[in-house]
Amino acid sequence: MAKPEVLIIEDSPSLALGYAAQLEEAGYAITVAGTLAEAREALRGSSYAAALLDLQLPDGDGLSLLEKRNDNSPAFIVITSDGSLSRAIAAMRVGAFDFLVKPVAGTRLLATTRAAVDQAKVSGAKKDRTKTSDKTSFHGFIGQSPVMQQVYRTIEQVADSRASVFVTGESGTGKEVTAEALHAASSRNRGAFVAINCGAIPENLLESELFGHVKGAFTGAVENRIGAAKAADGGTLFLDEICEMDLKLQVKLLRFLQTGMIQRVGSSRAEPVDVRIVCATNRDPMREVAEGRFREDLLYRLNVIPIHLPALRERGDDILLLADRLTATIGKEEGRPEVQLSVSSRSRILGHSWPGNVRELQNALRRAVVTAADSQIEIAIANPRAAAATFEVGPEPWASSAPAGPEPTAPNAQPTGEPSFEGMTLAEIERMAIEAAIRRTNGNITKAAKNLGVNPSTIYRKLEKWAAQADDPRFADP
């Protein structure tokens, strides 16, 4: 069986010989090129599975090889110094498979080279991949608008890269669907897809969830745990709500990304892990960096391939296509396959701004299907702005409209201008605070959530719950 061929493009003889020795011992056939001209000549005469590429060569910029690559080009692994990290990221964006920072650990060199060679073997490489062409659905997505077609193309273009992907977009736009699509469209789809929500796990447990722990590492560690990174070995690790991660753990995540090694909590042994990282947030990552909540160097490492998901209101006629598909799916799930949207419901859907995006649409359709009296379903949109207006019964309880008078003198009197929560439950106080925040921002849920220090999806869930209770006779006033 022929050995996989790897081209090393490096002008430092000592480094080139070091890389070659490690790779030859691992079973690869090695060719070394010390200049750009030698590399071009080597690439013209042979078919390499992978190539290690130094960007700073004596006779030119190694990036030019990437810019002129074709379907027969090898998977380029850029090897760079810390000072040229921004150029390495630029190389990833024009098609590099991965990048390594000098000095390169032997385990990382071998793992990355093996992954690059494996990619070249899958399905005859990318030239045999079926391309998207105005599809109405794509790996879990539904939509044919131009903005969604661009998302589909980006996913296909970067699916087989090792580059980290940073997905941004409003809550409910489909960030996890994007991560799953990247995994399904890649050669890693035979491996595991593991998702971890950085905002849903307590800070003191997140490291263990991510990297694992050994038995006895801390109170409650009654058995060994491999962690999400090891579970995703050979596949894709999705880090949702990445901006919620504690700064101390961000340092360990950065170290993992640089070395490809994990260390379980309570263990002194490092283990190699081969994963593709996809992360997501509904926050502005640059603002998080500016305000000191997210490390800038980690953002650069993660934000190699940015994908921004458009809001549902920006997707044109996709909304009716989505509504029809979701209605059919939900109808089957609920045992009502005959249901269809009424004409008035379709008009109502088009007229709504859908601040909760696809998730809000899906929830509204499920309510309509479940409560429909016949096959024509009528959708009732729980508009948070309208809900806030419905709940409004006047100014905040502590904003007194009575004429100014003398200060209260009773020992237990409530000071003027202060809220009185006497006789109220915690749930009632919470609702009062949320409704007041919505009023103060004129119905802007995102701003209200920011002022309250919570995620917008939390407010949407609360409003939906209160709206459902208002329609439920069990919650009616006696």
Image (cartoon, rainbow, N blue to C red):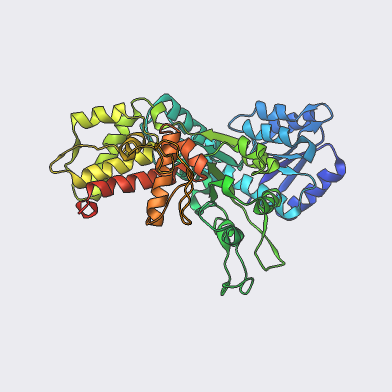
Q: Is residue 184 left or right of residue 15?
A: left
The residue shown at (41%, 51%) is 429
Number of disc labels: 0
Q: Position of residue 437 (x, y in %)?
A: 45, 39
**In this view of the protein, can residue 443 be seen by the observer?**
yes
User: Would residue 81 be seen by someone viewing this image from the given angle?
Assistant: no
What residue sits 19% from the left and 46% below the top? 371
Pick out the residue farthest to the left.
374
Residue at (53%, 46%) from the top-left corner? 241
Location of residue 249 (image quadrant)? bottom right
Q: Nearer the viewer, residue 361 or 427?
A: 427
Above or below 255: residue 227: below
Q: Is 247 displayed left or right of 184 in the figure?
A: right
Q: Position of residue 27 (x, y in %)?
A: 70, 53
Residue 57: image x %, image y %? 81, 31
Q: Residue at x 71, y 35 (%)?
A: 88
Image quarter of the C terminus: bottom left
Nearer the observer, 453 or 422: 422
Nearest the eye: 295 or 194:
295
Residue 36, above or below 455: above
